[in-house]
Image (spheres, rainbow, N blue to C red):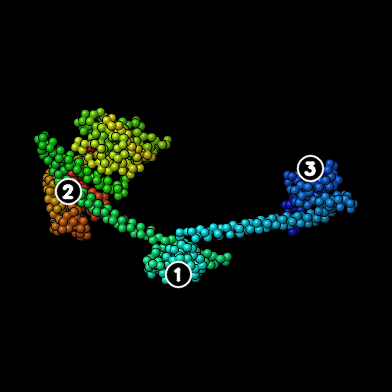
């Protein structure tokens, strides 16, 4: 070890002579040492406690305690006893030198000294001190390692015994193989899973694997040696002849040179799981088939109900404009009301089916809350007036004008709750309240709370949860008096939760009910919006002369559509009762527009429209679908091939409005 290796080592110089201190301090500092000085033994002992030096240069003749006593005290202290002490003194008698060695000094330099000699002795003793210190540390570490190894070996023996017990008790098969797939160890479960006893001679593993699974197993073996781990599923023959499904997870074990030396596999019997999966697959297929049958039934039911409803509501609309007798008008109004109720019922059933299938998704847009509340007032004011009820709408002065929500579904929620409140209340009031609670200073988000309160018949405490179930009604409720199917509140709850809200009810029998709907963290829109509701006026529309091909297999529907055009002589109707006839008439007459029913015999509207759109001569003709199928997936399918669609039952206003998109007319639609 040279002096450069000891640069930065700390040397303590103890001498009462300032001149000696100065000489040694300057010389040793230039040599790269960190030098501390003390002028008495007492100062030296105090300094050593705070700064542990690597070596001490100690004068003997000093006031107070001399160098011999200072050295003795240093050596008596366990923390400082190993620090080398080099005496530097003017005492040159042998007896003084011997005494210095007796009290623990490692060397003795007589004054006057040569600086080079002092430096050489310092480096020698520092080197010896550092080497001894390193050796002691290595000895301590070695002893600790020996102790730890002994402990580890003891623990290993205990661990081996414990884990061997665990391995033998494991339900999974545990297998240790060499890289040639020779068995090194198998636990009891390995044998038991194949119908053998431990110690039995088993046939070769690969010869018992199902032939169809063998290629995949060999691929997994390749993966194992490439990546060090692999998983596989396979079938292996049981002793009794049947196939056992297994899942194996394998890892490579490497030697010290990082070369594979063994394979550890943990194998689980998954036969029961496979059987359950097969049963679940069959159950899923059966459920999907049932769901498809239900969807087909609902689609057909929708079509079969909407088709006659198209005629009922359509001709009712026409007769309303022609009949002047008040009693007959009341009869017509009853027919129209009953038809709309029936249409509402089929819409509720379809909505519930979509909700249960997870196919009904919210469509968000900016909605004017104040306009929505005004609409509710207009819709229910007549019925409320008839029953002699008081109707209140209560809102906060700073209620946000516009929020982001699904307007259609929110209207449906209001319609159901308000409809129930009016239906079940014979005296008192119905109140619709809206409150909010903003989150931030910018008022960009808020909790919106809607409340519909009535003074009606109320709901018993034990039935307040069940009223939200499909087809459930309050027990004892008179169906003859109140009617209903029990779908309204079920759909309301589903719609509310679909939009991220929650619905609660509080009620007392004979005193009324309060339904609270809460939507949290709703976005508020601050852009100004018009409160005026646009209404289409079709009275001023006059079409240019045009030929319209009407394809519908139901004669009543064709009669109805022709009636809608009774005050539009400029529209010439060409009739077809199926898709094949429609295609032939389209080729013959080249109409300006085609109204196409989608469900017809011989050739349906889908096939007829595809053939029209594939014809170079006919493809420019707009095709508008007239469909009684309200299922969204089928509407999407229709819009893939048609130019537009309108759902049955279709009103005159709706039909004229959609035709103005494609036929030339002399007056634009106006908005009120």
Residue 150, position as x, y percentages in the image: 63, 58
Q: If you read the primary sequence from the N terminus, does the residue marked by circle 1 or circle 2 appear first? A: 1
Image quarter of the N terminus: bottom right
Secondary structure type for disc 3: helix
Residue found at x 83% / y 46%: 69
Q: Who comes first in sequence, dot 1 or dot 3?
A: 3
Q: Quadrant of the C terminus?
A: top left
Circle 2 residues within 10 Å: few <14, some 14–19, many ≥20: many
Q: CA distance from mark 3 to mark 2?
A: 113 Å
Answer with left or right where residue 596 lies relative to residue 104: left
> In the image, residue 243 lies at what x, y percent?
38, 65
Q: Secondary structure at mark 2?
A: helix
Q: CA distance from mark 1 to mark 3?
A: 85 Å
In the depicted view, which residue is nearer to us: 458 or 95? 458
- Reading the image, the residue beneath label 1 is 202
Front residue (pair 309, 589):
309
Give left or right: position of 87 versus 314: right
The answer to which of 327 and 226 lies nearer the viewer is: 226
Residue at the limit of the structure toward the right, as seen here: 93
Corner quadrant of residue 590? bottom left
Residue picked out by circle 3 = 43
Picture disc at residue 438: none
Q: Which residue is mark 2?
A: 307
User: Taking 198 as reference, is 504 above or below it?
Assistant: above
Q: Mark 3 packing: few (<14 Cα in 10 Å), some, or many (20+)?
A: few
Instruction: Kindly identify the residue that appears in the image at 22 percent across and 43 percent down.
Output: 345
């Amino acid at each position: 070890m040279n002096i450069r290796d000891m640069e930065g080592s700390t040397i303590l110089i103890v001498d009462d002579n300032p001149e000696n201190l100065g000489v040694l301090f300057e010389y040793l500092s230039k040599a790269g040492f960190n030098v501390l000085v003390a002028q008495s033994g007492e100062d030296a002992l105090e300094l050593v406690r705070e700064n542990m030096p690597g070596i001490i240069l100690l004068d003997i003749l000093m006031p107070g305690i001399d160098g011999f006593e200072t050295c003795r005290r240093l050596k008596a202290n366990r923390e400082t006893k190993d620090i080398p002490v080099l005496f530097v003194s003017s005492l040159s008698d042998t007896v003084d030198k011997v005494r210095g060695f007796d009290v623990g000094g490692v060397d003795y330099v007589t004054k006057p000294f040569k600086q080079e000699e002092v430096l050489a002795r310092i480096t020698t003793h520092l080197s010896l001190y550092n080497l001894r210190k390193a050796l002691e540390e290595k000895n301590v570490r070695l002893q600790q390692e020996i102790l730890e190894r002994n402990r580890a070996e003891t623990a290993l023996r205990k661990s081996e015994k414990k884990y061997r017990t665990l391995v033998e008790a494991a339900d999974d098969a545990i297998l240790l193989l060499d890289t040639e797939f020779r068995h090194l160890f198998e636990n009891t479960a390995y044998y038991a899973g194949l119908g053998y006893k431990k110690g039995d001679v088993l046939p070769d593993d690969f010869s018992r694997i199902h032939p169809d699974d063998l290629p995949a197993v060999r691929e997994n073996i390749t993966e194992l040696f490439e990546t060090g781990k692999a998983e596989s599923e396979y079938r292996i023959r049981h002793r009794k002849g049947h196939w056992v499904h297994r899942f194996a997870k394998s890892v490579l074990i490497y030697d010290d040179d990082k070369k594979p030396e063994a394979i550890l596999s943990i194998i689980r019997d998954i036969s029961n799981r496979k059987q359950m999966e097969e049963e679940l697959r069959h159950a899923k297929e059966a459920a999907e088939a049932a769901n498809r049958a239900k969807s087909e039934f609902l689609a057909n039911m929708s079509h079969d109900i909407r088709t006659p409803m198209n005629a009922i509501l359509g001709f009712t609309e026409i007769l309303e404009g022609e009949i002047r007798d008040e009693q007959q008008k009341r009869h017509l109004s009853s027919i129209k009301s009953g038809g709309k109720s029936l249409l509402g019922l089929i819409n509720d059933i379809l909505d519930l089916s979509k909700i249960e299938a997870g196919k009904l998704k919210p469509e968000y847009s900016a909605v004017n809350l104040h306009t929505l509340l005004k609409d509710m007032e207009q819709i229910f004011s007549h019925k409320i007036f008839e029953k002699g009820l008081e109707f209140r709408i209560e809102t906060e002065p700073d209620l946000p004008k516009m929020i982001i929500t699904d307007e259609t579904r929110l209207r449906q929620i209001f319609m159901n709750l308000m409809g129930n409140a009016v239906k079940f209340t014979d005296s008192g009031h119905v109140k619709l309240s809206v409150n909010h609670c903003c989150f931030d200073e910018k008022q960009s988000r808020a909790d919106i709370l809607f409340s519909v309160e009535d003074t009606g018949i109320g709901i018993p405490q034990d039935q307040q949860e069940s009223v939200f179930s499909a087809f459930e009604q309050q027990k004892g409720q008179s169906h003859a008096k109140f009617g209903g199917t029990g779908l309204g509140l079920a759909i309301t709850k589903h719609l509310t939760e679909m939009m991220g809200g929650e619905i609660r009810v509080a009620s007392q029998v004979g005193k009324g009910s309060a339904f609270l709907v809460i939507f949290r963290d709703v976005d508020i829109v601050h852009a100004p919006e018009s409160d005026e509701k646009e209404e289409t006026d079709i009275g001023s529309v006059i079409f240019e002369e045009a030929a319209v091909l009407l394809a519908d297999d139901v004669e009543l529907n064709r009669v109805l559509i022709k009636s809608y055009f009774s005050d539009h002589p400029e529209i010439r109707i060409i009739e077809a009762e199926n898709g094949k006839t429609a295609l032939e008439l389209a080729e013959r007459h080249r109409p300006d527009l085609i109204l196409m029913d989608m469900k017809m015999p011989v050739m349906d509207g889908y096939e007829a429209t595809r053939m029209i759109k594939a014809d170079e001569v006919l493809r420019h003709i707009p095709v508008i679908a007239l469909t009684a199928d309200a299922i969204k997936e089928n509407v999407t399918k229709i819009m893939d091939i048609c130019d537009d669609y309108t759902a049955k039952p279709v009103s005159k206003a709706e039909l004229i409005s959609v035709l103005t998109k494609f036929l030339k007319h002399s007056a634009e639609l106006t908005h009120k």
